[in-house]
Amino acid sequence: MRPETAELQRPLRFGYTTGACATAASVAAAHCLLTGIALQQVEIVLPRGQRPRFSLAYCRLIATGAEAATRKDAGDDPDLTHGALICAQVALRTASGVRFYAGPGVGTVTRPGLPIPPGEPAINPTPRQMITAQVMQQAASVGYGGGFEITIGVENGAQLALNTLNPRLGICGGLSILGTTGIVRPFSCSAYIASIQQAVTVAHANGLTHIAACTGAVSEQAIRHHYALPDLALIEMGDFIGAVLKQLRRTPIPRLSVIGGFGKISKLAAGHLDLHSRHSHIDLTVLAAEAAALGAETALQAAIRAANTSQQALALAHASQVPLGERICLLARDQARAILPPGVAVEVWAIDRIGQPVGHAGFA
């Protein structure tokens, strides 16, 4: 077997969330503070019982207590924070329990609708529970009866956060510490999906009645030409239309606009909820069949099946006055309606590469 073939066939590595890394750093710092022993590795317990070990970039006593850090390994997931240094500083306090603070690179919540209230550091509930349980176990093991002040930081987190939805969600100054299982599955893009869920929840909590799910910057700019929506209403969904639709079943908002390139909208029309090329593909045969249903001649159907791209297929159809863009948007709207609750109306826009509409299925 050729080396590159073996590489393609090897199992994809899983990794660990920022929440798991923050827990490892906190436990190591607490241990150092309580015992004076600086660890090189630390074991933690994840919510489902796994017990991974984390190597530490540093673990040491400081004037205010102790600090430790570990580098995030996201495995083979294309994670924004892969390789980031996740840090924790731990200090003692008289009151029991744990008080969390946002260090450099960790954001602060400023809007309602997130699982953490405004004014708190953007450390989600599961990481808080993991850290609290395990540092308190450290305390019990040495007979310490007080609590801790824990400050979590992320190296370059403020800059990294500019590439996330955090600024739009009202999470200011840095990243969120996320994770419900502690594990990042390869290509699950769990952090991205979590940010979509949060974006919909925040829009709902702030009383918005119309949101737009956009595949990227071009589609976002295109929808701005049609509606005067606030930034909070613009959901950058990427390829994860399924995350938007499913979250709206939990937190319904009356009107949803879905907008994206014709190729991605055609995938939704075919029933795909993950629009990335790893998980779904554009079926030119289906496009040809839909063109046939609109009256396309045999030669046009053959040309669509032989097209290099969905955009070429669409151009061929439109050149023959076959409204394939409209048809695909209608089918995509039907797929979205099948998932959304009855109180949510949906429209679908398909655009070309420069953001011009090539198909539309309205709210009616």
Image (cartoon, rainbow, N blue to C red):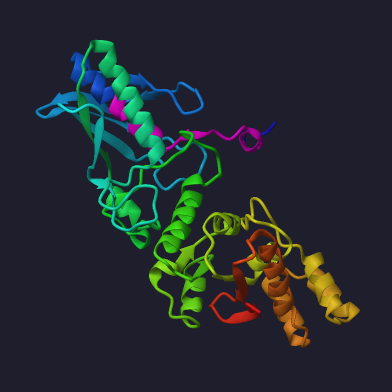
Image coordinates for residue 277, horizontal then vertical, percent: 64, 55
- Figure quadrant of the N terminus: top right
Pick out the residue farthest to the left.
63
Residue 21 visible: no
**Quarter assignment of residue 322:** bottom right
Instruction: Please state the extent of the stretch shown in magenta in the rendering.
Output: 4-27
262 over 151 or under it: above or below = below
Please give the name of the residue rendered at 62% of the width and 32% of the height, measured from the top-left corner.
Answer: 10
**Quarter assignment of residue 332:** bottom right
Question: What main secondary structure does the magenta stretch of the protein show?
Answer: helix
On the picture, is 189 further left or further right than 289? Answer: left
203 over 300 or under it: above or below = above
Please give the name of the residue rendered at 41% of the width and 59% of the height, measured from the top-left corner.
Answer: 202
Pick out the residue farthest to the right.
298
- Figure quadrant of the C terminus: bottom right
Image coordinates for residue 278, horizontal then vertical, percent: 64, 51
Please give the name of the residue rendered at 81% of the width and 73% of the height, measured from the top-left corner.
Answer: 290
Image coordinates for residue 124, horizontal then vertical, percent: 38, 42
**Quarter assignment of residue 351:** bottom right
299 over 66 or under it: above or below = below
The residue closer to the viewer here, 136 or 167, is 136
Question: Residue 10 colored magenta?
Answer: yes
On the picture, is 152 further left or further right than 182? Answer: left
Image coordinates for residue 141, horizontal then vertical, percent: 28, 12
133 over 236 or under it: above or below = above
Residue 291 visible: yes
